[in-house]
Amino acid sequence: MFRKLQIKPKTREILITIGEIVLVAGIIFGVLMFIYSRVQHEADQTSGVKNSIEETTKSKDALKYLLKVNKTKQRMQIYKYTSDINDKQLVKTFSCSVASDIKPGKYITSKSYKWVRNGRWHKYNTHFGKNSFIQSADYSYHGNSYLLDESYDSIGASRSTGANITLLAADAYWVSKHCGNAEIVEVVKGSFNDEIGKVDTDKVARGSNCGWDPTDPEKQNPYKKMKKGTVVQGDETVTVEKDTILDYLKNLIALDDDGNDITSTLKYDKFNTKKKGSYVVTYTGMTKSGKKLEIDQVFKVIDTLPPIVRCKKQRFTITEESFDFRVLNTEENVKKIEKKVKKYVVCNETDAKIKVSTVGRHDLEEGYVPVNIKAIDKDGNIGSCQVWCKIKIKPPKDTTTVKPTTRRITTSIRYFIIKKKHKKKKKHKEVETAEQEAGL
């Protein structure tokens, strides 16, 4: 009743070929979709969106805190998880400044640092996301008494640039101590109608001269030691960068008998910050009641800043006339480049040692090569910059009696033939080197 379907050999081959094409197309489509998903995943990580609990090094059960940041209200609410991961309770509310570059989404904290230079210096830093920090206000230098007034005063208002969240020192310290390892930071846009309770740390009015954050939990904080009719200091030794203009009152607070700030009335002698070393400055003053105030402060002048080095020219050129490209590969050409560049180098520290270097002679070839410039001062601080030197090789002038036009054509042909052989030889050498390194 049924006849067996007969398929011609040629038709069978066509069907097999079509099947193979469909199979290969399916594999290619699958690979492309995998690549697309990886790209999307990496993009999400970069922007901070869709970072989930599973991406942390902790399990859901090990999570302790959720840091919820409201960009509109400029508040950070910290929730502590209970034994049930879906249940949490509010434990802290901090005033903060959220930079405009931080996008809404979920991020993960990774590590804490006491001091970080991120544009400015910051204290009590907690890294989260790709390259963002929860941190203190700005400091002009790596020291407790170098807090910048405008940065401290702006906490509670949004920042126009950057990708960090700024807190009072006490709050930044709490976060760094409790939330530095794989906790969730959830940033939301929020609205002005959101109800957020009172903050746990109030912004304290600062003295007219003292450069400390009043909320800093450091025990040597002068705000914790100040008393009526006394003068107190913060750090026993204040570190000063060489050649800086020193504010002598940043580490002190002096109060009269009524508790008024009289720090600016203290008298003292200045010293030269151009010379490294330790200096003792004695401060004296007097209250309205006639009580004498006196205190000694040690300053240590150090040099940690690299010298500023630059080159008056950014591009240099050397030219060789030859048919043989090997004339480039000489120590003489290396020295010629370095000597030529060094003539244009200037440095802000006249006693710094200048070093100019370029590639090795075997790497000299037509085109641009980098030239590195370093300035090393007496304290070992290194400043650097880079310029470029263009290497050109051209055919030598032919002095034979051949007609000028013929001579130019012949010279050019010889030049390009040799150039082609040189490139082919170089490529062959690179292949041999790669094979040797691979053990082939």
Image: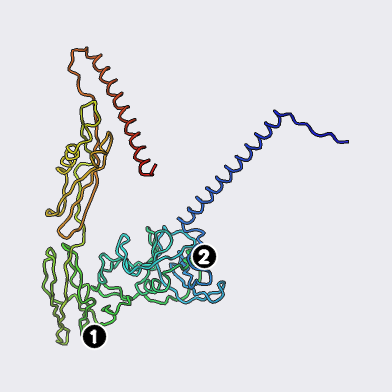
**Which residue bears the numbered disc 1?**
228
Q: Is residue 369 left or right of residue 90?
A: left
In front here: 92 or 395? 395
Residue neighbourhood size for the residue with mark 2, other residues' Cα within 10 Å, grouped as few (<14), some (14–19), many (≥20) = some
Q: Label 2 sits on what residue type?
A: Ile
* Labels 2 and 1 touching (C-beta < 8 A): no
Residue neighbourhood size for the residue with mark 1, other residues' Cα within 10 Å, grouped as few (<14), some (14–19), many (≥20) = some
In front here: 421 or 40? 421
Viewer-side label of 2, 1: 2
From this viewpoint, is residue 157 visible? Answer: no
The residue depicted at 20 percent of the width and 74 percent of the height is 237
Tell me where residue 248 sits by quadrant. bottom left
Eyeballing the image, is 206 above or below 97?
below
From this viewpoint, is residue 54 visible? Answer: yes
Task: State the image coordinates of residue 366 (x, y, percent, origin top left).
Answer: 27, 33
Task: State the image coordinates of residue 267 (x, y, percent, origin top left).
Answer: 13, 76
Helix, strand or loop at mark 1: loop
Task: State the image coordinates of residue 293 (x, y, percent, origin top left).
Answer: 16, 83
Image quadrant in which the C terminus is located: top left
Say the numbered circle drawn on residue 383. Answer: none
Eyeballing the image, is 29 above or below 41?
above
N-terminal-most mark, 2 or 1: 2
The residue depicted at 24 percent of the width and 74 percent of the height is 210
Q: CA distance from mark 2 to mark 1?
A: 51 Å
Helix, strand or loop at mark 2: helix
Q: Is residue 55 left or right of residue 306?
A: right
Q: Residue furthest front?
A: 440
Image quadrant in which the N terminus is located: top right
**Which residue bears the numbered disc 2?**
53
